[in-house]
Amino acid sequence: MFGYIIYGRLKSKRLAKKALLTLEGKSLLRVFIERISLSSRIDKIVFATSDLEEDKPLTELALTEGLETYCGHPEDVALRLYETSKCFGFDCFLTTMIDGPFQFREVIDSTVDKLNDENYDMLCSYRGQPNGTDCYGLRTGALETVVNSKKANDTECWGKYFTDTGIFKWGEINLFEKRPDLKDFRLTIDYPEDYEFCQRLYSDMVSRFGAGFNLDNLVRVLDLEEYKQQLKDVRELSKKWETHFLTSGTEVDKDVSRMRALQSGGRY
């Protein structure tokens, strides 16, 4: 079975309780459900959060939106995703954080098809696409290998286990390959400025094309001068986010170095 795991918590300090925000009167989870459901490739959508009391509002929201939920380790995201996948019987799954609600059928379908047809362990689409339009595709068996081999308990930056250890077959999906000028747009919600931008963009997309807007529709809107003029400010936000991302990956980086050394030495 092929699943989609949306995951998130309420611990954000840059934008407090961002996972409970709304777009056009809809919860981010509802927007996710509507966007993912445009694809026929996904058998089941679920939500994963922590087992801490502070994240219970998210569990309640997921229930309200009709999503089954798995509550797991607060900081060990890799373990939480693995346990969620096993709980719901997913052989493979796509995943992304709740702060990236601009999901597209084209990205989902391409990721599922490539994961199935070319036997990848992991596929990602972030590096070539605007942040927030991306997702990861994972084979549950490959993630099990990570969980059984890692030592880190804080695995927010879990993608490095697949891209940097030399153990797994991984690849990229980039549906913006012919439009590299658009990759700096932030369609994710990390800062108040992101939220303001995403509110405006989502409202604009829905008013022009309806809630089922596609990738071509997005490109047409981002090509408008009013959006291009905002890119300088967007790039400054991205620099702040990249600094946070680098500092939050210390434990995983140590793990990756150890696993890569074992792999190159033939002892892994």
Image (cartoon, helix red, strand yellow):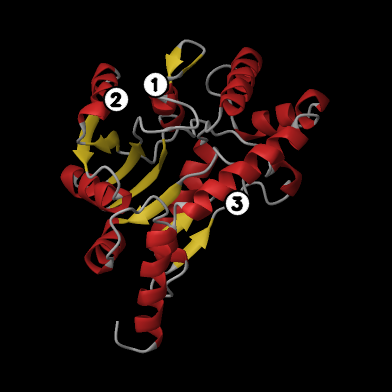
- What crowding class fits label 1: few (fewer than 14 Cα within 10 Å), some (14-19), or many (20 or more)? some
Amino acid type at mark 1: Leu
Residue linked to disc 3: 174
Looking at the image, can residue 191 be seen?
Answer: yes
Helix, strand or loop status at disc 3: loop
- The answer to which of 153 and 212 lies nearer the viewer is 153
Q: Residues at badges 1 and 2 in contact (C-beta under 8 Å)?
A: yes
For the residue labelled by badge 1, is the local secondary structure a helix, a strand or a loop? helix
| Residue closest to the eye, 197 or 139 | 197
Mark 2 vs mark 3, foreground winner is 2
Looking at marks 1 and 2 on the same chain, the residue that comes earlier in the sequence is marked by: 1
- Image spot of residue 93 (x, y percent): 33, 48
Q: Quadrant of residue 261?
A: bottom left
Q: Callout 3, which amino acid? A: Asn
What residue sits right under mark 2 in the picture? 58
* Residue 130 in view: no
- Reading the chain from its start, which is encountered first: label 2 or label 3? 2
Residue drawn at x 21%, y 37% as measured from the top left: 70
Could you say whether the residue bearing mark 2 is in a helix, strand or loop? helix
How crowded pointer 2 is (Cα within 10 Å; few <14, some 14-19, many 20+) is rated as many
- Comparing labels 3 and 1, the label whose residue is closer to the camera: 1
Query: Where residue 218 sits: x, y (%)?
Result: 66, 30
Residue holding disc 1: 20
Residue 125, image x, y percentages: 54, 50
Judge from the rendering whether residue 28 lies leftward or rightward of residue 204; answer left or right: left
Assess disc 3: are there few (<14), some (14-19) or many (≥20) residues with their C-alpha within 10 Å of its C-alpha. Answer: some
- Residue at left 33%, top 40%? 5
Label disc, if present, on residue 1 of the rendered structure: none
